[in-house]
Image (tube, rainbow, N blue to C red):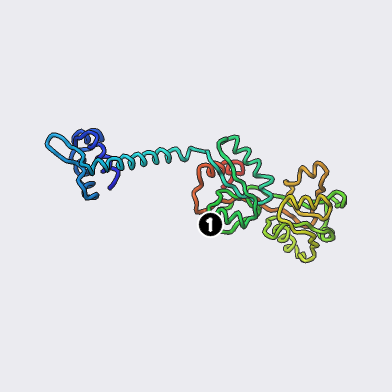
Amino acid sequence: MDFKQLEAFISVAKLRSFSKAANAIYLSQPTISSHISSLERDLNIQLFDRTSKEVNLTPAGESFLQYANDIINTRNHAITELSNFNNNISGKLNISASTTPCNSILPTLINKFNELHCNVKFNVKEQGSVGIIKDIIDLNCEIGLVGTSIDNPKIKCYKIMEDELVIVSNPKLNLPDKITIDELLKYSFIIREKESATRQTLESSLSNSHIDLNKMKVLCEVNTLDAQLKFVKLGMGISIMSRGLCEEYFNSGILKLTCLEDICLKRAIYLVVSSKRTLSPIGTAFFNMCKDLYNLK
């Protein structure tokens, strides 16, 4: 049973004539007859009583007509919906982002996207890179923003910008504008959890400079940005954070910015999507906006 057979059946049932049905749907009468005969064989039932003067539905044909109309209407509705799908930028977009991009980059991106497409709602989830990758692979979100490159065949990774990490402290600690790593290790650290890309960048940079990580005096390990900032504001220790996250605090004098003299603390921010999934129209529009903004290739 196929759509052509159903269309022929509906047309004959409506017009009560094979020849009129053929003219109505631009087919030959033999083709119409063939479609009806094939349909009756497929269903193993007679749908029409045929006489020399007219064609009438059998009781089985009357019953089947409603189903045939429903099937054709459903098909037509699906075609209409799908034809509008790619142009319909509305609904909800799920985005997962690690701490730095979630609090510094993503709000600006969403604000810009909202100016272009006002009928979109966002579900934003802040979490570590491991959770972000899992959500994308499990199809729980379409777009991810992370502070580390992802080596996974199920993920496409696009570098969007460089991020500078700096030393953040309470001004009362009187840290200089620049400091060596040996001087830095004299202070207590407030650090993020092991899964944090910022911490991984710090530890990788220290290891590459042959600095023993055990020399770091870790006072507190936290898993949220708010907790990290509160400890630093109280002067309980220093921390390594994205410069972009703390610019307002530096300008207002609440926090002090210090740069390392002998180690470069920079990392990239990446936009990540699934390599196995076609993005929705909303996801595609958001990705294309980022592609234009950051010249992604």
Q: Is residue 236 above or below residue 85?
A: below
Furthest residue toward left: 52
Total marks shown come to 1
Measured from the top left, where is residue 31 in percent x and y?
Answer: 20, 41
Measured from the top left, where is residue 68 in percent x and y?
Answer: 30, 42
Q: Is residue 259 left or right of residue 151?
A: right
Measured from the top left, where is residue 217 in percent x and y?
Answer: 81, 62
Residue nearest the viewer, comparing 6 with 31: 6
Residue 39 appears in the figure: yes
Q: Residues within 10 Å of mark 1 (few under 14, many from 20)?
A: some
Q: Is residue 212 above or below residue 82?
A: below
Measured from the top left, where is residue 159 in percent x and y?
Answer: 62, 50
Residue labelled with disc 1: 154
Question: Where, by quadrant of the figure, is residue 247 drawn?
Answer: top right
Residue drawn at point x = 74 percent, y = 50 percent: 226
Q: Is residue 57 left or right of residue 105?
A: left
Question: Where, by quadrant of the figure, is residue 55 drawn?
Answer: top left
Look at label 1 and name its amino acid. Lys
Residue drawn at point x = 78 percent, y = 56 percent: 190
Residue 26 appears in the figure: no
Q: Name the secondary structure under disc 1.
A: loop
Residue drawn at point x = 26 percent, y = 42 percent: 63
Furthest residue toward front: 59
